[in-house]
Amino acid sequence: MKAAAFDYVRPDSLRETLELLEQHGDDAKLIAGGQSLVPMMAMRLTRPALLIDINRLAELKNLKRSAGSILMGAGTRQRSVEDDTALHAQLPLVKCALAWVGHAQTRNRGTVGGSLVHADPSAELPLAALILDARLHLKSKAKGERELPVSEFFLGPMFSDTGATECLTAIEWPVWERQGTGAAFDEVAIRHGDFALASAAAQVQVDAQGVCLRANVGAGGVDGVPRAFPAIAERLVGQRLDNDDLLRSVAVDATATCEPGNDPHASAEYRRHLATVLMERVLRQAAWAAAASFEGSK
Amino acid sequence: MSKIKLTSIAIKVNGVVREAQVEPRTTLVDFLRDTLFLTGTHIGCEHGVCGACSVLVDGDPVRSCCMFAVQADGLSVTTVEGLAPERGKLSAIQDAFCEKHAMQCGYCTPGMLIACHALVERNPHPDEAAIREAISGNLCRCTGYQQIVDAVKHATGAKSGAHD
Amino acid sequence: MTEPRKFRYIGRHRRAVEHRRFVVGKGRYAADIQLQGLLHVAIVASPHAHAKIISIDTAAALAMPGVHAVLTGEELNVNTEAMLPGVDAPQVKRYPLAHGVARYSGEWVVAIVAESRALAEDAAELVEVEYEPLPHIVDPEQALQADAPLVHAANGSNVIFQRVFNWGEVDAHFAAAPHKLSYRARWARSSTVPIETFAVSAWSNDATGILDVWASIQMPKFPDQLARALRMPGNAVRVHFDVDVGGSYGVKRGLKHAVLVGYLARKTGRPVRFIEDRLENMRGGDMQGPDRIFDVTLAFDGRGIIRSMRMRAVDDVGAYAGRSPLQLGKPVGAIIGPYRIASVQYEAISVMTNKTPQEAVRGFGQAPTNYAIETGIDKVARYLNMDRIELRLRNLIGKDEFPYLIPSGTTYDSGDYATVLGKALDAAPLAEIEKERDALRARGQLAGIGISTCLEPSGGNSAFEPLFNPKNQTTTWMDSCLIRIDLNESITALMGTSTSGQAHETLVSTVVGEVLDREPDSIRVLHADSLNALPSNSPVGSRMAIMLGGAAAGAAKKLRAKLMRIAAHNLGLPESELVYQDGNIAAKTEPAKRLTWGQLVEIAHRKIHQMPKGDEPGLQEKFVLEVPTGGKLPTADGRVQMYPCHSFETHLVLASLDPQTCKVTVHRYVCGHDCGVMISPDVVHGMTYGGIAHGLGAALMEKFAFSDDGQLLSGTFMDYLLPSSMEVPSISIVDHCTPSPLTEFGQKGSGEAGYLGGPAAIASAINDALAPVGASIDALPMTPYALWHALARAEKNSS
């Protein structure tokens, strides 16, 4: 299990990175954390001729906090997000999601942007980004900067809308008002830290009376891409969330649109069932967390 | 097959800068083992699951099978051979591993020690849940983890499990 | 029952000798051996479950710079001997590389030798093999059908071994029993999967004619078999047993790996190394475990007394067989478990399929059989609406019934099963666990308590060889130790096998220290190489505490006796007047009249004039220990003493599953364990914890799954799931000691502890959890998906 031979370059700037991508196109591959890429190279499932190492580009590690959003460099390590308690308050769902991501060793290397570009349908961060409707900033030498909502980014299993000459530079995370907001992430994996058989995430905002102002819910591992269901979740707005039937109906209707696959660990039918169960649970847990946010401020 | 291309690197390994020429495709673990003959770091899966190859890179535990040696150029790497405070001595964690029989075949042990050192660095008094989380990325087939958990508790002054 | 003896070093906490090197990264594993000029091997494997090999084009690979050799089965097979199956099936020929036909996906077809492993892999991609797919068979029951495709056409059948044994009055007992209950239990193909894959290096010295081999092995008679396969004299193959083996628990056999590498080393004249990568290890490493279907009927009365059992076991051994069919033989020695079952009919069927071959796994087939028996015990309790513990107590062999002869011919040495069970229940304590279970149920979880009472036969004899192969008349399975005391007064002991985590250096030094009354930490224990070693059958079959410990004690006792003779001779007193303490020998009545350890050693090494007549100079003694109770061939009806000693374990488990996701959580785990006298309690506990974790994997997570096409679907660590620290619960072990009357110190084996009763207990807990909703499951692994299926089936049946 040794990778096929390749050339390696570690550019000093994003500009240089983009020039290299322009020059080598499909033959080149960016390496960030490498936690998925290196095993794939070792198994020779992928064999770039040129590996462009962007781990040390400071430009990809910036964190800009503004009123309604956080602009996070794509090269930000998962571990540094995990350690940033201030960030947790602003992005509670990201915090919840990270608790399920791999292990200390992988989070120390793995980057937020890398996880999104890799587009594993069971991965946690892509699902969290979808629920929050994050915006992605991509750059290439020829076309300059491009922004798109993450909902348009995932195209299929391990397949994202990243052009051969493009680099994901930043993720713009919308920040919800702290008071009244609650998030939850849950998944079923046979072993801790593995990619889930199915996962679910939700973030909701309620008013002091417990009436829903805003909500989104989604599931991972149950389709070729992670799925969010903003339109179905919209039904929750204006409703109190302590209504199990309502939450269940949202989960059931959301799952109905998923097309999970079969493998030895789980059939499509079981995955569908899990998605329903987990989405109902995360909605309930998010609602509890939202309600609790008022208690905390009293 | 074109001619093998080599890249010059310098990595500070266990406090000493080691310079070498490597093929870019050489993983950090292969470099440590085959070039520096630091065979304490082991290979278990080469696909980022078992944790046997764990080392500290700039103080943080990472899997050295999921990183190419060229990527560590200019960085500081600590392997199991570098955990002891000095030659002939053991760290508190190493000592506790011996005392609590926290290993059998010893193959996962270097990776486990790396994970435990990193844990204690961040959290000097971890509870059992924190210990289990910290070693969850390191598979052991001999111990059932129990005596490893006991060893970390022992080293950090927490109350240990059965058979004390 | 004798009380356990008092010891100075045995049974005490002592740091294992081996740990010191492991924690500083100075272990020396096979992959750490760095030979000058080392070449590396990569493999081209068959992508087909069954295919004719039409042609192999190696030209492009050979032409690549850095490539030294490309080997196919065509060359290798005419120059080596086939590896033998453990049963009488001479047409099931097995070589390291396929020739003519490839019989499973992952089977090795071509080996490439190059300057680096990466280059060898590059060259492997250039080899072109043309295959013609043949009909294949992956289902073991279909493989038994007359019209099934044949894995080995020359064998004429896919069945490599089949025999029906009748021990006792089975028909009469069945006819007389008021109740019969039949069930099927399925043990999935899993294995021990050590974190170290198999590694082997070899170097052939043309001048001496010796082939040196360093391999991560745990295998009886490995050097002899390797020499035979390579057509070399036994004294030309030197296997170095001083490599640390990174876990094995049975599977590290690697004969085909070593034959290939040995051949390549001789062919190239260079040191050659092959380290399986994880993909090769899982697919073509030939280390998958038993894969069994049990069909069992129990005959019992209304009080739950089980009189007789009929068991049919079909084991899928994969495409080739070494010792794997014998894994149906070992359980013959504990076929009634710890119960007073008076008669047994046992049909053992080993069948070949187009899957990766099976290898020995921890317990050598006993864990699946224990699981099958325990499944039945729980079912009888449920059928009679009787408490499972009470049912066991009614059937367990009583402590006063030992030695106990079982229907299949083995005599159990000793035990006190009910007391161990009681101690575990008290320690839990059961009432508290029941309260916890009820609390979980009140929270909507499906919670259950699991129980198992199982045996671990130990002392590793090989009586299943003649039992399953009348042409094999092996009746001994000895082990040995050589001890020297040097002129500088230190003790060195030599063992003749490698160690894969069992702390043999600690075992031997503790035992020798005990007998010679010397500080164990001052005693050096070395692993000889095979040309310097006394005979050993390696640490298989839970045997080393008994066999190596016994041999070490035997050699140490000979030394102690010699020291006594020297003292008696020099002090002018009969030995009965002398007392031995700390290695010094003094007159009982006159302590000043003494010879110190140093003086005694000096006499032996330098002063032949002071030696008693007939004693050799120097201090070195060997002891070759035959397995206690060994030495007999089976009777015509297949009765035989299998292993000498029988450890006992009982497991008590509280587990729950989320009724919606079906994810299982193990909340409490208690294991009552009796392996007689523990020489190194930390080591015994460690193995038991590890065995339980391994058992949890087999019960809940681990499976080598194959597609209908015969492709392995769990060939990585992402698909074959070893439990992590988050799945394995905190475990408490309750010790009990019933010494064995057959061994030096009263010790029994414990190398397979935990694994032999763990899967059964976890399965028991799951079924106890499922019972209130009318569901059940009798197949491992009990994954969330499988459990969800079981619940859905129950729901369908009830509606």
Image (cartoon, rainbow, N blue to C red):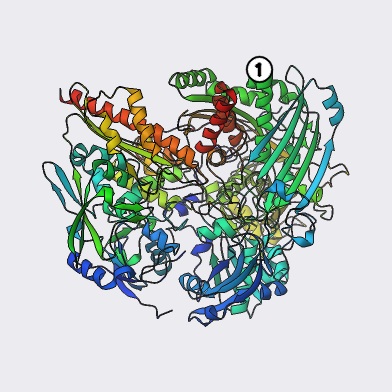
Give the quarter of the image for residue A12. Answer: bottom left
The front one of C552 and C130 is C130
Q: Position of residue A225 (x, y in %)?
A: 36, 48
Locate the C terminus of chain A and report the quarter of the image it occupies: top left
Mark 1: which secondary structure? Answer: loop
Tell me if residue C248 comes above or below residue C405 in the rendering. Answer: below
Tell me if residue C645 comes above or below residue C269 in the rendering. Answer: above
Residue carrying label 1: C385
Give the quarter of the image for residue C215. Answer: bottom right
Q: Position of residue A144 (x, y in %)?
A: 17, 63
The front one of A52 and B117 is A52
Q: Position of residue C403 (x, y in %)?
A: 77, 31
Q: Residue furthest left?
A: A67
Tell me if residue C320 comes above or below residue C184 in the rendering. Answer: below
Image side of residue C472 versus residue A8, left or right: right
Q: Position of residue A249 (x, y in %)?
A: 36, 29
